[in-house]
Image: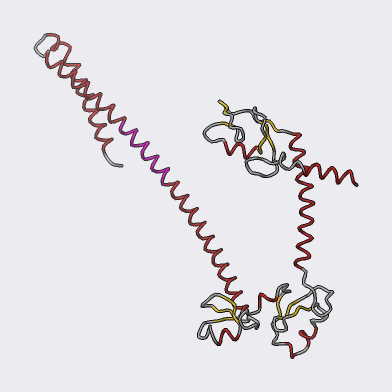
């Protein structure tokens, strides 16, 4: 038993060595980089944005280093994490149990079933029977077990705070209602709790509607972007066709002008007439294509 405790103590003394210097928590999937330092894999990758350097010694690497998992360190860190959670978790759970237990104010042994805010006392099921069976206790206000009843007592008048002032947003006693809060709107704690629950439900519904609208907006924006991109691609294609036709028309005009400048030579009379006819046909065809492309669909 002593060896186990000594082993646990030795392991706990290594907490600093088992802590990632980036997230300051126990290593999770530790990796080693060329300079010899260890970090959580996710922590290290998130720190590498524009360059690759060691977050601890600032050694700069020209290329991204190959990350290798430190299996030994990973095993030790996991063992430390398990033992630490057991020791701390067990103590925390025990303290919480002790802290949250409300005893019966009558027998001081059994756990309280409910607290009477009128009697300012807590009762187990057995000692709560008069409140359940005797009509005299019917007006008494019962609630879940309350450990610190002083939170329900007015510090000014030492009376039970059984009203909720809606104007000031706080619990008040009957004396406060007649003096300082005279004329204020008020409701019972149950009504105030139900109102708060309804508001929370409305907030949840509103948040859900906002998320749905945001999703619809993202979908609509994506569709608009796709249509815009398709329109721009079509416009680029039509512009290219227009420029190609313009170049062909320019060349055709130059050839016609050249032939016309040789109109007095025998060569033009024998051969040029056929070539001129073909060029005119080509020019008309190009003009017709230009007219069709320029029309709106």
Identify the residue at image location x=79%, y=52%.
87
- Camera-side residue of 289 and 272: 289
- Does residue 8 appear to the left or right of 242 in the view shown? right
Reply above or below: 211 against 185: above
Main secondary structure of the magenta stretch: helix
Report the number of discs.
0
Reply above or below: 125 against 254: below
Q: Tell me where residue 233 appears, x and y as whole percent.
A: 37, 36
Identify the residue at image location x=73%, y=78%.
115
- Does residue 58 appear to the left or right of 230 in the view shown? right
- Does residue 282 appear to the left or right of 101 in the view shown? left
Extreme-left residue of the structure: 264
Whether residue 111 is in magenta: the answer is no
Which quarter of the figure has residue 236?
top left
Read off the magenta span: 224-239
Q: Tell me where residue 225 appears, x and y as whole percent.
A: 42, 44
Extreme-top residue of the structure: 266
Whether residue 231 is in magenta: the answer is yes
- Does residue 237 appear to the left or right of 183 in the view shown? left
Q: Tell me where residue 66 appears, x and y as whole percent.
A: 64, 28
């Amino acid at each position: 038993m002593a060896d186990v405790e000594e082993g646990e103590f030795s392991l706990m003394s290594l907490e600093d060595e088992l802590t990632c210097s980036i997230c300051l928590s126990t290593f999770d999937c530790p990796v080693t980089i060329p300079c010899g330092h260890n970090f959580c894999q996710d922590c290290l990758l998130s720190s590498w944005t524009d360059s690759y350097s060691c977050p601890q010694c600032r050694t700069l690497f020209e290329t991204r280093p190959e990350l290798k998992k430190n299996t030994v360190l990973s095993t030790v860190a996991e063992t430390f994490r398990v033992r630490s959670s057991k020791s701390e978790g067990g103590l925390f759970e025990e303290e919480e149990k002790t802290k949250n237990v409300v005893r019966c104010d009558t027998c001081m042994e059994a756990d309280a079933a409910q607290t009477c805010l009128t009697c300012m006392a807590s009762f187990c099921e057995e000692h709560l029977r008069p409140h359940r069976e005797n009509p005299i206790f019917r007006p008494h206000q019962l609630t879940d077990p309350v450990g610190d009843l002083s939170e329900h007592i007015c510090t000014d008048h030492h009376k039970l705070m059984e009203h909720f002032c809606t104007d000031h947003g706080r619990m008040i006693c009957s004396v406060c209602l007649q003096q300082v809060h005279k004329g204020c709107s008020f409701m019972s704690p149950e009504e105030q709790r139900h109102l708060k629950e309804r508001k929370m439900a409305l907030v949840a519904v509103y948040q859900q509607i906002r998320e749905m609208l945001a999703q619809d907006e993202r979908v609509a924006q994506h569709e608009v972007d796709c249509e815009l991109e398709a329109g721009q691609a079509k416009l680029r294609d039509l512009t290219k066709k227009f420029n190609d036709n313009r170049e062909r028309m320019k060349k055709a005009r130059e050839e016609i002008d050249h032939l016309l400048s040789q109109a007095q030579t025998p060569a033009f009379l024998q051969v040029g007439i056929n070539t001129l006819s073909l060029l005119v046909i080509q020019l008309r065809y190009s003009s017709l294509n230009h007219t069709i492309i320029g029309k709106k669909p």
